[in-house]
Image (cartoon, rainbow, N blue to C red):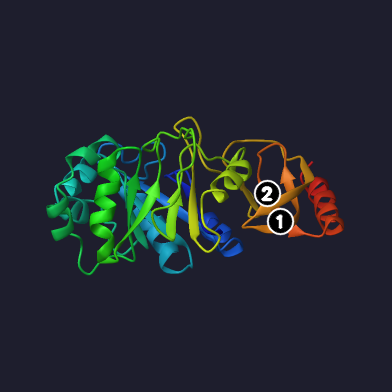
Amino acid sequence: MKLKIVTITGADDHNNPKQMAELSDKYPFVEWGILYSRSQEGGPRFPSKDWLQTKFATVKRNSSMQTSGHICGKWMRDICKGNWTPFAMEAGAWGQMDRFQINFGSSIIKVDINLFEANLPDPCPTQIILQIDNRPKSIEVYERLKHTGKVAPFYDQSAGIGRLPDKWEPPLSNWQGYAGGLSPANVQHHLTLIDKVVPEDYSIWIDVETHESSRIIFKGNKTMGIFKHKHRWIVIRTIWQYEYGWGVFCKGCHTILETGLPKEQAEQIAKQENGIRK
């Protein structure tokens, strides 16, 4: 299994896009998941249109940031009926995002597959991500649309509420996303579980989502955590992006700073970081 992208979802008006771009430069595998909802726009985890079209858009145009737009609420329900127009006209997202994710949730049962397929955007963004859960209809929608080459499955049994599944399901495609309760505290353990059900030559991405009680917190230009914390860097054995070696891990925020290193080098980095961040 190859881990290609780590999506961090939940940036809002409290975040500085310049810091997001700096993190993307240092960690090119990071993708920023931007939540779109007409009713929640401007609230926690749902950025305002002004932030998106001014601060964020300016930085995005001049950076290598990877981005995905996660469509929720009324705009998502319109799309279930094959109507992309309200989202395209009102959200101002076209051209800003590299791909779009449809957060179906329970609305998956209302999807008119024929209308949905007939009205897929053309030209299409790089990719349309379809949320897959334990409802047979979600799998049916993907199976019907995969021939278009425009869609990718995204396994999230919690339907976006951040609850870990009882078990991770095998992928429907050789390029698939996984989410549902993944956090800096548990991601390493659950990647080993996902690896057991994903063939060796398949590629995946994962989504680490913030919750309503938290925000994405930046610490200077060098590191980022989901929660406010005190850094306490230690050396651990790592399996990250399936590079085996030693890594530098923060016990305070459960963030991996470096990975795949010789143990001696990891110890030196941890010592240095602990000196900087007292």
Q: CA distance from mark 2 to mark 1?
A: 7 Å
Badge 1 density bin: few <14, some 14–19, many ≥20, Cα 10 Å: many
What residue sits right under mark 2 in the picture? 256
Secondary structure category for the residue under label 1: strand
Looking at the image, residue 62 lies above or below residue 270: below
Q: What residue is rendered at 64% in x and 51% in y?
A: 223
In the figure, is residue 226 to the left or right of 249?
left
Which image quadrant is residue 23 in? bottom right
Pinpoint residue 85: horizontal percent, then vertical percent.
15, 55
Q: Quadrant of residue 105?
A: top left
| Label 2: which secondary element | strand
In the rendered image, is residue 52 in sight?
Answer: yes
Which residue in the protein does label 1 denote?
259
In the shown orientation, is residue 119 left or right of residue 191? left
Q: Position of residue 213 (x, y in %)?
A: 48, 30
Q: Is residue 46 left or right of residue 234?
A: left
Q: Which quadrant of the rendered structure holds the C terminus?
A: top right
Dots 2, 1 in contact, CB < 8 A: yes
Q: Quick check: 71 above or below 181?
A: below
